[in-house]
Amino acid sequence: MAGEGAVADGEAAATAAAGGSGGGVTPTVVMSCLTAAAGGLLLGYDIGITGGLTQMESFLEAFFPEVQRKMANAKQDAYCIFDSQVLNAFVSSFYLAGMVASLLAGHLTKTLGRRNSMLIGGVLFFAGTLLNLAAVNVSMLIVGRILLGVAVGFSSLAAPVYLAEIAPARWRGAFTTSLGLFTNLGFFMADMINYRTTAIARWGWRLSLGAGIVPAVVVIVGAASIPDTPNSLALRGRLDEARESLRRIRGAAADVDAELKDIVRAAEEDRRYESGALRRLLRREYRPHLVMAVLITVFFEMTGAVVVGIFTPLLFYTVGFTSQKAILGSIITDVVSIASVAVAALVVDRHGRRTLFMVGGVVLILCQVAMAWIFGAQLGADGGRAMPRGYAVAVVFLVCMYTVGLSVSWGSLSSVVTTEIFPLEVRSAALGLGGAIASALTFMQSQSFLEMLCRFKYGAFAYYAGWVVVMTAFVAVFLPETKGVPIESMGAVWAQHWYWRRFVKPAPGKQLDGPE
């Protein structure tokens, strides 16, 4: 494979990146990576809490009484119970704020550092949680959601970059997938809280929103306790601190000179083009990176992952479960997702990225098509029929299987691939662009999915299945394997790919194998 045909003069960098001569993982690396991955708690908790709140009676009674009336109407079209523009605005304002924050976070992550950006994200999430906890009207809710969105915009960009830059090359995939693991832990934590608070009349929703203080404090305390990445410090000209950070990460006895030399060389190259990172990304030699920054992000969003993550309790309520049992079904999918992400972390650096993308894609297609058939045949085109309990249980099973396929492929690997393929000089800009696109698409889907479900009915699942067919074919043809390649040697991967090599020239002294 392209990623496995390493460069001759990159072996020293690979050895250094693997943790010095011993190739070990130091306690500092473990602590730093776990803290960065905890940034996923913020996103996971917010998505999980939102899905449960939007069908919680105490919350709907306080802020969205028209939706509560539709839930009580026995003749209501099941597909359209939650079709409310105000409710959509509550959900989607978070993602609109995240989109704007992503545009700024790329620059600030570069100038302030990866660690400080995560710290800012934690503080803003804490402030947004307090505002939502005290909310007395929809306007306060939405302002709080905007603060939460800005917080996640910062942490979602800084955390994966931190993980990619600090992890040893041989374990980079496993460490980076831990971000997905913590995101799913956030889902699980939120659903467990919602399961208890949904039975509390009048003020149960405040407990659900207020518990967001816990992941915020975890991120704040953790980010204040870890070093910034050597790459980030070198990029800001703080070489002594970069060396000290590298020693803390690789171990006091490790020889860090070779790795630091590669990092400093990349930072010097970046400083030659201090401004215009986005314009640089448009150059021909960065064409593969631009395409991947856009399409990997778009494809992940169009798996339906975010929609399923946000609206799983509503989906289970639609097929006939009570509010509390719908949240229980969501908890089951959370457990399946956590286990699947753990498996992905174990196999991603053994079997590679492409294999998992392909296997996961097949599973996603089969599950989406099966759900379209069940909804169409059993719930009816008008949503007027009650779904038999056996088929409702089958929907829960299919969502669990969908979660398995997603977790071992796009759910874990989209962040792994997008954080490891970009050169340092365009990394923050490319990830900022990807983050903005992701937030824009998530905003559009969260704002429109309930209406789309109301209009498309069961066809909504076939729509997402069609997208997964396209993205799986794209991976098969255009995505090179990057397993085990040091970040600073990643240019060789593109230079030997059958298609992308026409845009990327190998660096002087790089010995390339044949095309992938």
Image: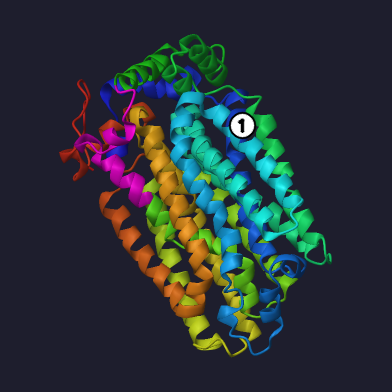
Quadrant where the C terminus is found in the figure: top left
Q: What's the residue type where badge 1 is placed?
A: Leu
| Residue 149 vertical position relative to residue 389 in the rendered view, above or below | above
Q: Is residue 484 visible?
A: no
Q: Nearer the viewer, residue 441 or 62?
A: 62
Q: How is the image coloured?
A: rainbow
Residue 289 at what x, y percent from top left?
30, 40
Residue 400: name its quadrant.
Answer: bottom right
Task: Kindly identify the residue that appears in the image at 33 percent across and 31 percent down.
Answer: 277
Task: Kindly identify the residue that appears in the image at 56 percent across and 55 percent down.
Answer: 93
Q: Nearer the viewer, residue 50 or 361?
A: 50
Residue 321: name its quadrant.
Answer: bottom right
**22 sits to left or right of 393:** left
Residue 502 at what x, y percent from top left?
15, 40
Q: Is residue 62 visible?
A: yes
Residue 366 at what x, y percent from top left?
43, 71
Q: Nearer the viewer, residue 213 or 466?
A: 213
**314 sits to left or right of 193:** left
Magenta includes 32? no
Q: Main secondary structure of the magenta part?
A: helix
Label 1 crowd (10 A; few <14 / some 14-19 / many >=20)? many
Q: Which residue is mark 1?
A: 119
Number of numbered discs: 1
Task: Kindly identify the residue that appears in the image at 49 percent across and 15 percent down.
Answer: 242
Q: Secondary structure at mark 1?
A: helix
Residue 298 at what x, y percent from top left?
38, 54
| Residue 268 vertical position relative to residue 429 in the rendered view, above or below | above
| Residue 301 vertical position relative to residue 173 in the rendered view, above or below | below
Quadrant where the N terminus is found in the figure: top left
Task: Kindly identify the residue that appears in the image at 58 percent across and 22 percent down.
Answer: 227
Magenta part of the protein: which range?
Answer: 273-296
